[in-house]
Image (cartoon, rainbow, N blue to C red):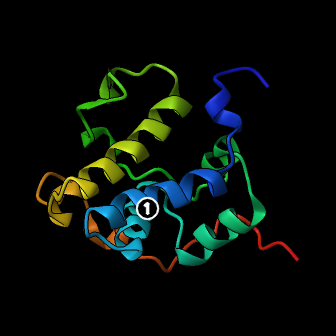
């Protein structure tokens, strides 16, 4: 596999870090799930399956039901880079996810995080339509 080493990191290793960051700031796991589902198209079962299967971030995004069509509205700095200027598509998706969790932890309102009123559709953030990662036995 070519590319940045973060691509091979398991979603299972990143997800609890996202949850811990949000919970330290008084947010809930369900809110982390909501922003990840909004971005990727996964539902709650799909997220659980991705964690259980310990898929890489690359596989997590490859199997994602679909990147939210309003993801391009996610802008700003994350890890010293403007997310809208990241050229590698996979790295950009990973940084979009980082940015959403960062906004959640910073106390931003969910309507703003999900880009409601700016073309974002918050209903697509609600789990319930696509699993993505097959359940492991």
Q: Looking at the rendering, which quadrant does residue 77 occupy?
A: top left
What residue is shown at x 52% (from left), y 22% (from top)? 88
Residue 85 coordinates in the image, percent (x, y):
34, 20
Nearest to the observer: residue 66 or residue 95: 95
- Residue density around tag 1, few if under 14, some if 14–19, many if 20 or more, within 10 Å: some
Is residue 64 shown above or below 91? below
Q: Secondary structure at mark 1?
A: helix
How many numbered marks, from 0 up? Answer: 1
Residue 39 coordinates in the image, percent (x, y):
41, 54
Is residue 91 shown above or below 57? above
Q: Which residue is mark 1?
A: 20
Residue 79 horizontal side relative to residue 105, left or right = right
Nearest to the observer: residue 104 or residue 66: 104
Is residue 68 shown above or below 91? below
What residue is shown at x 14% (from left), y 51% (from top)? 118
What residue is shown at x 22% (from left), y 56% (from top)? 113
Q: Looking at the rendering, which quadrant does residue 74 occupy?
A: top left
What residue is shown at x 35% (from left), y 53% (from top)? 101
Residue 31 horizontal side relative to residue 89, left or right = left
Residue 134 coordinates in the image, percent (x, y):
76, 68
User: Quick one: quadrant of the C terminus?
Assistant: bottom right
């Amino acid at each position: 596999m070519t590319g940045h080493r973060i691509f091979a990191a398991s979603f299972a290793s990143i997800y609890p870090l996202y949850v811990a960051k949000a919970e330290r700031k008084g947010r809930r796991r369900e809110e982390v799930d909501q922003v990840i589902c909004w971005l990727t198209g996964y539902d709650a079962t799909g997220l659980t399956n991705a964690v259980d299967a310990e898929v890489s971030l690359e596989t997590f995004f490859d199997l994602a039901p679909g990147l939210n069509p309003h993801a391009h509205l996610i802008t700003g700095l994350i890890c010293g880079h403007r997310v809208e200027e990241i050229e590698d598509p996979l790295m950009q998706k990973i940084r979009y996810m980082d940015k959403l969790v960062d906004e959640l932890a910073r106390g931003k309102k969910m309507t703003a995080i999900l880009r409601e009123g700016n073309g974002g559709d918050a209903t697509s953030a609600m789990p319930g339509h696509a699993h993505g990662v097959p359940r492991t036995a």
